[in-house]
Amino acid sequence: MATARLSRKRARTSTSAASTSCNVHSRGASIRPHLVVVRPKPDCRPTTYFRKDFRMAKRLTQLQLLTELEPVAAHNLNRHLSLAKEWHPHDYVPWDGGRNFAAMGGIDWDREQSRLSDVAKAAMITNLLTEDNLPSYHRVIAEHFSRDGAWGTWVGRWTAEENRHGIVMRDYLVVTRGVDPVELERARMAAMTKGFDPMSAVGQADIDSDELADAGFLHAIAYVTFQELATRLSHRNTGTVCDDPIADRMLQRIAADENLHMIFYRNMCAAALDLAPDQALEAISMMLRNFQMPGTENPNFRRYGALMATHGIYDRRQHLEVVVMPVLRTWKVFERNDFTAHGERTREELAGYLAGYEKEILRFEERRERIAARKASKQKTPAPSS
């Protein structure tokens, strides 16, 4: 009996220490006897030991997933807050270069006023309209996360940080007259009216509706992990083609935010893989096989997207080699040994999809090279003399 009392006392002490290691908790959930959080590893993701019956469960409900992963969310929220730097959009805009438009007695926009190339314009407009659709992204995240504790705090903080991106980009483009502000506003109205839901493609896939309802959280964190990294890359490369140090500095600042956001979601996905390996891998595989970049709802997306791909801002190879594969390697998806037979089949399906995607990239690149060669040949051919 004395040994049993001592064991229970040690368990209570261990759990209490784990619960106080995070500053943010959900109401009434600071002590979780089924979860122990120990010293974080160097990657700042705490090692977690989940309750055995959950690890052995066939499928976890969304509520169970949120409850079990909430301490990990609290840890990563605190990590994010310790690393995020305060910045202000007005510090990144060259206000002294601005002037009134016609409505205020000035001059309206003209193409000759812009110092941006056509590629830079396309990329800036695409990236800004993507940032403008924040209400759609907030809705998806808020619907699948909790409003309480660390989850609710993260959703609010993430939304507030993301909101700065559209503010500073629009101010820069309007002040510098980089693009037509009237057309930009019309495009914003059209894009936001249409909205964007990354879950729609998954909803249309061949998956049981009951399973999809409980997988919404996993699909959401899987999607935003890849999307945040993709957006970071697009912003960084856009800054390069703008050929303006002010724009480059602004977009580097935005990209730094996106990187921290990606790390939060990547760590949450990693913890989900530890908690429910098969279920998490299903969500990752489903999202990758139906992945859509935000911006597809924007006017001119196809034309601008093709222009951006041609000039190396964001293309299929970058998506695979710079976004998808590094994240999968971080999660050790192809090295893990904790999947069941069902999970192994999911992993094989994912590997097959990635191999097929690589073949599609090669065909696309070969076609692009042939088109470029034909254009170059036409330019070299002298015009017939009259």
Image (cartoon, rainbow, N blue to C red):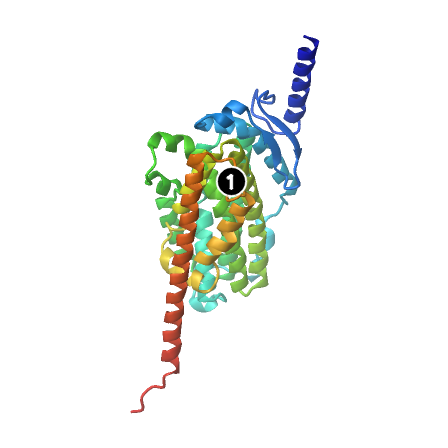
- Residue 109 visible: no
How far across and down, in percent of the image, does residue 236 sit? Answer: 54, 57
Left of 148 or right of it: where is 368?
A: left
Residue at image location 43% in from the left, 67% down from the top: 111
Residue 183 is drawn in which quadrant?
bottom left
**Relative height, residue 265 to residue 314 (above, below):** above
Q: Which residue is mark 1?
A: 159
How far across and down, in percent of the image, does residue 150 sit? Answer: 56, 31
SS class, disc 1: helix
How far across and down, in percent of the image, does residue 125 sit? Answer: 44, 56
**Relative height, residue 316 to residue 28 (above, below):** below
Residue 358 is drawn in which quadrant?
bottom left
Residue at image location 39% in from the left, 40% down from the top: 199
Query: Is the C terminus in the top left, top right, bottom left or bottom right quadrant?
Result: bottom left
**Relative height, residue 297 to residue 343 (above, below):** below
Residue 285 is drawn in which quadrant?
top left
Left of 53 or right of it: where is 290?
A: left
How far across and down, in percent of the image, does residue 359 sit? Answer: 40, 57
Identity of the amino acid at label 1?
Answer: Thr
